[in-house]
Structure formats: C-alpha cells, structure tokens
Amino acid sequence: DKERKKATPRTRRGHARGRARRGGEEDGDDDEDGPRRAGHRRHRNRRGRGRASGNEGSDSEVEPRKTRKNQANQKSKEDGEEEEDEKGCKSGKGKNEKKQDKKSDKKGKKEKANKKKKDKKKSGSGSDSDSEEEPITEEELAKLKEEVEEKKKLIATLRNKPWKMKKKLSVLKEAQLFVEKFEGALGKGKGKKFYAYKVMMTKKWMKFQRDFENFKTACIPWEMKIKEIESHFGSSVASYFIFLRWMYGINMILFGLTFGLVMVPEALMGKPYGSLPRKTVPRAEEASAMNFATLWDFSGFAQYSVLFYGYYNNQRTIGWLKFRMPLSYFLVGVGTIGYSFMIVIRTMARNANEDGGGDDTSFNFSWKMFTSWDYLIGNPETADNKFASITTSFKEAIVEEQESRKEENIHLTRFLRVLANFLALCTLAGSGYLIFFVVRRSQKFALEGLENYGWWERNEVNMVMSLLGMFCPTLFDVISSLENYHPRIALRWQLGRIFALFLGNLYTFIIALMDEINLKLEEEKIVKYNMTIWEASLYNGTIPENSTAPPIQVDPADVPRGPCWETMVGQEFVRLTVSDTMTTYITILIGDFLRAVFVRFFNYCWCWDLEYGFPSYSEFDISGNVLGLIFNQGMIWMGSFYAPCLPAINVFRLHTSMYLQCWAVMCCNVPQERVFKASRSNNFYMAMLLFILFLSTLPAVYTIVSIPPSFDCGPFSGKTRMFEVISETLEHDFPSWFGKVFGYASNPGLILPFILLMVLSIYYLNATSKSYKEANLELKKKLQTSRRKQKKK
C-alpha cells in the first residue's frame, strides 16, 4: 500500500506496458474468468428474483412465512457460491492481478448498487401490478369487513372495558393499526375501490362535522367570557349573562325591523327636514335647539327627527317605490310585540323540554370526583378555568346536600318569614307613594313652565325611579336574610319582591303619563281652535274676499302646532331608559370598582380586616341585575311604538353592559358565600319576562285602540283611531270580498270563542305534560329501587 501511494505516473505507465506484454499469458486466465463472470450474472439475477418474490409476498399478505424462508435459503446458497468463486479466483492470481482485481471489485460494487436500486423499483412496480391483477375473493373481503367493523367497535367501547390502562393502550394501538392497514386494502381489488373511497369520505365528513361544531361554538358571542365567569362564580351568575346575551339577540331583531322598515324609508323617501311644520323646529326653540343640554333632554333637533313618532308624515305612499309608511309603521309596532311573545313562549317550551324529569343525584360526589376533568385540555388558562369550575361545582353540591339534611325550628322560622314579608310590603307601599307624589309634583312644574326650574325638577321622576331601583333591592336582600331559605328559593323570593317594586313603579309612572296625555288632549283642542282663528285672521288681513290670488306661503317654523302627546310619551321613555343606563354604570364604577380599590389598598393600614369585615368585596347582585334587565326591556316594548329609536338605544346599552359587567365581575366581585346551582332552565326568568311583556302591551294597545291620535303629527294624523289604517288599506288595495271576510273574522263573536278554545287547549296540554313528568319520575324511582335490589343480590 505504501508503494502504491508513492507511485508516480511513470511507474503506472510501466505497469500498464507490462500488462500489455503479458497479454498472451493472460489469455488463458480470460478463459477461466468467463465462467466466473457468468456466475456473477446468475447471482445478480437470482437476487433480483428473490427481492421481487419478497415484495410480491409482502403485498399479497397471503403466504408471508414461506416467502421469508425461500429468501433466506436463496441468500445462503448465493453466499456459498460467492465464497467458492472467490476461493477459485484467488489461487490463480499474482501481485498485479490482485491490484487489478481490487479495482474491478470497486467498479463491480458500484454497478451492483445501481442495479439493486433499479431492481427495487422494478420489483415494487411489479408487485403492485401483480396485486392489482390478483383480486381479493368475496369471502376474504367479507371476513376483512367483519374484522374491521369489530376493531372499530372495540375502539369505540374500549374506554368502558374493565382493563388496566397498559392493556387498553396496547389493544388500542393494535386495533388502530389493523383498521388503518386493511381499510385501504379492502379497496385494492377490481371493483372494490368504491369501498375505500367511501371510507375516506366518511372520515373526512366526520372531521368536517367536528370542525364545524367547533366553529359554531367559536361564533357564539361572548361564549368564552361566560364560561370563564361560570368557572369562577358558578352557574347562577353565568345564567344572568346567558340571559343578557339572549336579550341582546332579541333587541337586534327588533332594531332591524324598526330601522329597516320605518326609520330608513322615512329618511330616504320621505319629505326632508323643514318641508312641513312637524319636521321643523319652532321659531321660539331654534336658538337653543343644538345646545348639549337640549339634545341630552332629547328636545330640539332630536325631537324633530326620525327618532320620534311626530316626525313621520301621514301620506299613504312615499317615494318612487310607493312605500306605505303609515301601514308599515303600524304593522312593525304590532309585529315586534307579536314576535316577542312568540320567541319568549318558544324559549320557555324548549327549556321545559331540556329540563326533563329532574337531576339524577345518585352518586353525585363520585361522578364529580372521577369524571369532572377534561384530559383534552392543553391550554394553561383553560386548565385554570376548569379547575375553578370543578371547585365551584363541589361547593354547589355540598350546599345542596346540606340543605337537604338541615333541621330547623319551624315556629321561629315562620315568625321571621312573616316579619320579612311585612317589611317588604311596607317598602313597596312607600316606594309607590313616593313615585305618585313625585309625578304629581312634576305635573305641577309642567303647568307652571319648566323653564323656571332647574335640572333636578325637570328630571325628578326619572332620578327617583332610578334611585329606588338602586337601593330597594339591597334593602330586600337584608330582609331576606331573616327567612333562612335555600339560596335558590331565596333568589326567587328576592326576584318576586323586586319585580313587584319595579312593576308598581312602572305602572305608577304610566298612570301619571295617562293624566299628562289627557292634559295634552285638552290643550290640543284649544290649539285647534286657535289655529282656525289664526288662519282666518291671516287670510282676512291680507287678501280681499273676492280675490283669486295663490295661497300665502308661511314658513313652517312660524306655523302654530299642537302638543303631540305621542312624541311626549316617547321622550319620557327614552329619558327613563338613558337615566337607568347611566345609573347602572355609575353604580358599577362606584359601588364595585372604587369599593374594591379601597379594600385592596387600605386593608394594610386599617384597624380591622377590610376583606372579611366591613365593607369587604361586593358580591354580584343576581336578582337586581336580572330585574333591571327585565323592566328595561318592558320599557322598550312599551315605548318603541312612540320612539322607534328605543331598540337601537337598548342594543347599545346591552352591548356595553356585557363588557362592563364581565370586567366588573372578574375584577371587583367575589363569589357568593353560599354558591348554589342554578336550575337547568331559565324558565323563572322567562316567566317574569312574559308577564312584564303582557303588562307592557296593555298601555300600548289601550292608546292605539282608545285614544285619538294627534291632528298634526305622526303617520296617523287625521284619523279618529290609529287602527283605521288597516281598514283604509283593505278598502283601497284589496278587493271588496276580502274586506268583508276580514270584517267577519274580526267580529268579537268569533274572536272570544277562539280565545276560550285556546285557553282550554293550553290547560289540557299543561295537565298532560305534568302527568307525563310525574310518570317519568315514578319510572326513575322504580329503576333505582330495582338497581339497589340487584346490588344486594
């Protein structure tokens, strides 16, 4: 080797010449090398055949053991032949031949490697073609299908098997490998590719359904925020935010109806501002029409805009589309109430179906202990929320168990409950009298002229109602501590008392508004008489009696006009809604945020522990917030007919309330001391909402049916009643027979029996559902007793 490394080009040429001289001597060796090269070729061919047969055997999956034995035998024979050839070749070589053989061996190895690669490609393609040419028989296909289905069932039910985790994992891996391997093999034969395609599309469809469900969950507004609140504060607090989100969706639909069918057509196709007296600010109010105080009070330019009833014209059709504005206004007002009834009743029915026959509390703590955790969680924040949720659920279950086993002194409890109800009734009577007194006082201010009084006198009614709604629920909460009810029952009593408070306040306010409407109607008669005198004096003072001159053009701002009681009612409801919203926000910032800041930073330098003593962190007031939502929605239903902007204001209020209250709950509040589980359905909230919807529609229906509309404002001006727009439309736009049919159908003699039939059917269905529910409970008890007997055996 050293001589070879030190060799120069000349010595290499000399070796080459020496090999050329000994050409004759090597002829004999060439004769011997011929059979040796033929042996190498046979050896390569045998190897290629062996690999091809091995590939065919692996693809066909029919006789794997035989092919492996044949390959091993062929390799041992070929190795023996190689060793014999090498021994025979070594004996007849010299030194130069050894060098030449080493070079030829290197070249041969490279050629063998290249041929091996080519043989692998050929053998692979050959095996595929052979497997395609050899179809699977029907019996084998049926067996494979049965085995694949069995493995799939095993994968689906493996979690319920009473095996060790190690065995479960090994069986799961084997089953998954088997399914992945033979689901594709089932589609390789001729005519069997459709099965493999169907399996592939089934998997993709299942994946698409799972992804689509995740997408739908991600598209639900505020879902993650509500889940986070539920994990820290329990299902009772989360039920409020779910109810708020539901109310937001309802108001979005109401806003779409009023905005798309009333406000936009009037703004685009109606007569512009300044064309009519009802669309123009009076001359006496023009100087202060754009002041902030005036606009905040919804007067000035805000009063004479599409936000309120009085701006709309009474033409039957407007614009090039011939849009029937009075008919659209009336149908949207009635349709919003009808849609609200339908959606509330439908939600109550769905919640009742989801409620079923009650919760199964058997082995409650065991289920919570061993099945609460979600092992698919991979996010630390989600894991923290899940941990808090499990902790809260244990607290709820402990409270339920304690309440079921609690023993109490019946006589003392009855006395305290009677005392609490007496104090609550006194509070309700005092708040009602205070509102009645304030409304009478405001009417006195209105007769004397509000310009002579300050801001408090002008907004006294709204502020008093907002303050009562802020402080009375806290007083009721103190009174409810005497009763010692279960937390869920105490919440319902609290809601009932606050409901009575808000209802009394609202109807006191409505009664006061009715008195003011009667005053406006009397003032309207005086204005009508004065306008006739004004018109007569205007014409008599400027035009001779026999003149045929055109009528006098008077600026709309100078024309006298009536009081327009509908706009006045709409303004009162808008002001009440805005003041209630501002009171709620101020309460959150002062009562929750500043209180939490004070407790947090002054606790280190105070005489006692502020966190566990007075004032401590505030708890989330479920009852007050729920009732605030319900009565705010009642005001929207009651006033949206006279102020089409009210649904838009309420959408903005609910949207901001969701973010502000979510922030306040997570940052400023603490969970309640007695965390309790809310009922599975929110039908108690829905029942109160349905009741307030019914009570809210009564004043609106009364004004539509009984009180005549204003003569110079609104889409129904010039008519004796608002509902006459229906008969006018039937008379002009429908054939005469249709009007007669509608008249017969609207006869009270047909409507009253129909209503009676509906009431009877509702009573029958309610009784039937109760009997079914009791039967389900009895069946569940029987199943539980039979299961206990089987365990004893």
Image: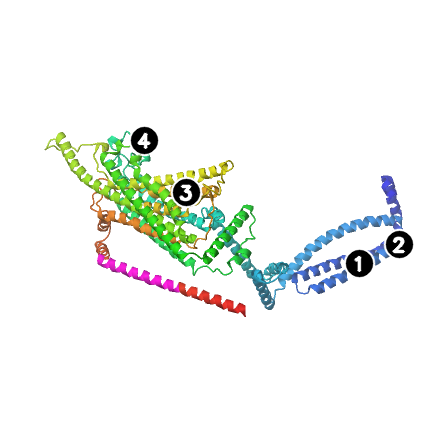
Residue 385 location, x and y as percent? 52, 48
In this picture, residue 723 sits left or right of residue 64: left
| Above/below status of 294 relative to 639 | above
Kindly identify which residue carries mark 4. Answer: 291
Look at discs 2 and 1 and give the one toward the viewer: 1
Label 3, label 2: how far apart the Cα atoms are:
102 Å
Q: What stretch is highlighted in magenta?
A: 748-772
Look at discs 3 and 4 and give the one toward the viewer: 3
For mark 4, give the secondary structure: loop
In this picture, residue 771 sits left or right of residue 704: right
Label 2, label 1: how far apart the Cα atoms are:
21 Å
Kindly tell me whether residue 500 is visible in this rendering: yes
- Which quarter of the picture shows residue 757? bottom left
Label 3–label 2 contact, CB within 8 A: no
Label 3 vs 2, first from the N-terminus:
2
Q: Is the magenta stretch mostly helix, strand or loop?
A: helix
Look at discs 1 and 3 and give the one toward the viewer: 3
- Which quarter of the picture shows residue 566? top left
Q: What residue type is labelled 3?
A: Ser
Label 1, label 4: how far apart the Cα atoms are:
107 Å
Kindly identify which residue carries mark 3. Answer: 657
Kindly identify which residue carries mark 2. Answer: 92
For mark 2, give the secondary structure: loop
Residue at figure coordinates x 78%, y 51% from the top left = 108
For mark 3, give the secondary structure: helix
- Residue 769 counted in the magenta span: yes
Label 2 vs 1, first from the N-terminus:
1
